[in-house]
Amino acid sequence: MDILIVGSGGREHALAWKIRQSPLVERVWVAPGNAGIAECATCIPLRSDDTSGLAEFAVQHRVGLVVVGPEEPLTKGIADVLRARGLLVVGPGAAGARLEGSKSFAKGFCERHGIPTARGIRCEDVGTALAHVGDMGFPLVVKADGLAAGKGVVIATTQGEAVTAIESLAGRGSLLLEEFLRGSECSLLFLCDGKSVLPFAPARDYKRAEDGDVGPNTGGMGSFSPVPDVTSAVQRDAYEHIALRVLAGLADEQIDYRGVLYAGCMVTQDGVKVLEFNCRFGDPETQVLMPRIQGDLVPALVACAKGRLADAWLEWRDETAVCVQMVSSGYPAAPVTGMIIGGLDKVSQDVMVFHGGTRQEDDQLVTAGGRVLGITAIGATMAEARAGAYAGVSAIHFKGAQWRTDIASGMDATRKGEQT
Ligand code: AMP
Ligand code: GLY
């Protein structure tokens, strides 16, 4: 079977790397891909928003499965178009992708179906939001409704900060005011075919740009899996109270959801609660999940696309994976690109280097985006995986390279075999 992956980041590189190991797969196409992806798949010059071009390509090349990476094409309905052409797709249609595309839809969905989440007030305009500013105490979480690449959320600790946040989000559509939840965060991903869910192992990502979780929100500075405090009891809680209720809700609202359901969760004292839904694989979570899958991923992806997920399973390696993102200077606000990347040949063979923003220019590899490379290592313990990832980082150089030095630190208590 030939598989087409849509996207061009570290997530798509990790997917291509894993998928091409499958004995079921002959050819892996990635649109548009990047310089690293070109080493394990065939990149085609079609942008991820070129829906009709991608559909045409997939039909002409008899692609057996399309896996859509980024959220934007999904919210615009790429999966509906591809399915209408008879293609098998991992990725929900526009109706399901609203779980990510509209925070107020997601909040309403949780409320309608009893899915645990932070209490929230949906406000159609700034005036309404200002009128409700004092209703839930502080800190207060202020969220813009639509896709914002991590930039649409402000945690306001005072009334003044909340007012400023609300005013700064004016013109971005409706707003959501939310109760601040305390606890530890995790990313719980499920393959979902509308009738069944198949969980991925838990992961955690680091959203803030700087060590100690300060600085601006980013697309993700690193990740690890498994997560020591996401015990099997927490996973069961999430399966029963989040995943199964989402399935019931999707059925009730007649949404045929075939793709990845990603629940960004807070493990609180009163159980796991949803902070957000994404309608796709997480990045950089996918860069630690793919290396931990034992055996083939492709049968589960095909089962998901066909609506036969009940028959599929995934096996997980016991080991821990840690990913450290190397990013461009100026990231996330204004990444400086075009820097020559060196040292990749010095990275140990067992460390995986997933490319995000890279480009081949003549015979040189140069930076071409904010998140440049994801350096992932596997180890028997968190400490071992972390040491491997940072050894990889220190071998690589490009001008202005930045990374967090505290990814997976203080997490060494992982007991082998305790989590999946
Ligand atoms: P979101 O885009 O909704 O995931 O929010 C981005 C980040 O803001 C999350 O990863 C959390 O760190 C934080 N956040 C969002 N909502 C809440 C909440 N209700 N309570 C505490 N932190 C939150
Ligand atoms: N790691 C966060 C995301 O993929 O949205």
Image (cartoon, grey):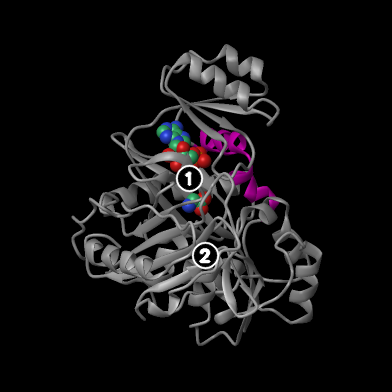
The quadrant where residue 70 appears: bottom right
Q: Tag count in the figure?
A: 2
Whether residue 392 is in magenta: the answer is no
* Three-letter code, disc 2: Gly
Instruction: Say whether residue 370 is left or right of residue 29.
Output: left
Percent x, y for residue 196? 50, 59
Q: Main secondary structure of the magenta part?
A: helix
The residue pinned by badge 2 equals 10
Give the answer, above or below, for where 202 lies relative to 65.
above
Residue found at x 57% / y 63%: 357
Judge whether 231 appears above or below 366 on screen.
above
Question: Does the image show residue 294?
Answer: yes
Residue 200: where, in percent of width, then height?
41, 61
Q: Quadrant of the N terminus?
A: bottom right
Asked which secondary structure carries label 2, the reply is helix
Does the beta carbon of the residue at mark 1 sit less than 8 Å from ligand 1? no
Q: Quadrant of the C terminus?
A: bottom left
Amino acid type at circle 1 is Arg
Q: Which residues are the magenta region?
A: 93-113
Which sits in the foreground, 74 or 14? 14
**Above or below for 251 versus 90:** above
The front one of 270 and 241 is 270
Q: Position of residue 307 (x, y in %)?
A: 59, 66
What is the x, y in percent for residue 223?
Answer: 39, 56
| Residue identifier under label 1 | 245
* Res. 122 image quadrant: top right
Asked if labels 1 and 2 touch by Cβ distance under 8 angstroms, the answer is no
Residue at (34% x, 33% y) in the render: 182
Q: Secondary structure at mark 1?
A: helix
Q: Is residue 314 visible from the viewing direction of this image?
A: no
> Mark 2 to mark 1: distance in Å?
31 Å
Nearer to the camera, 272 or 387: 387
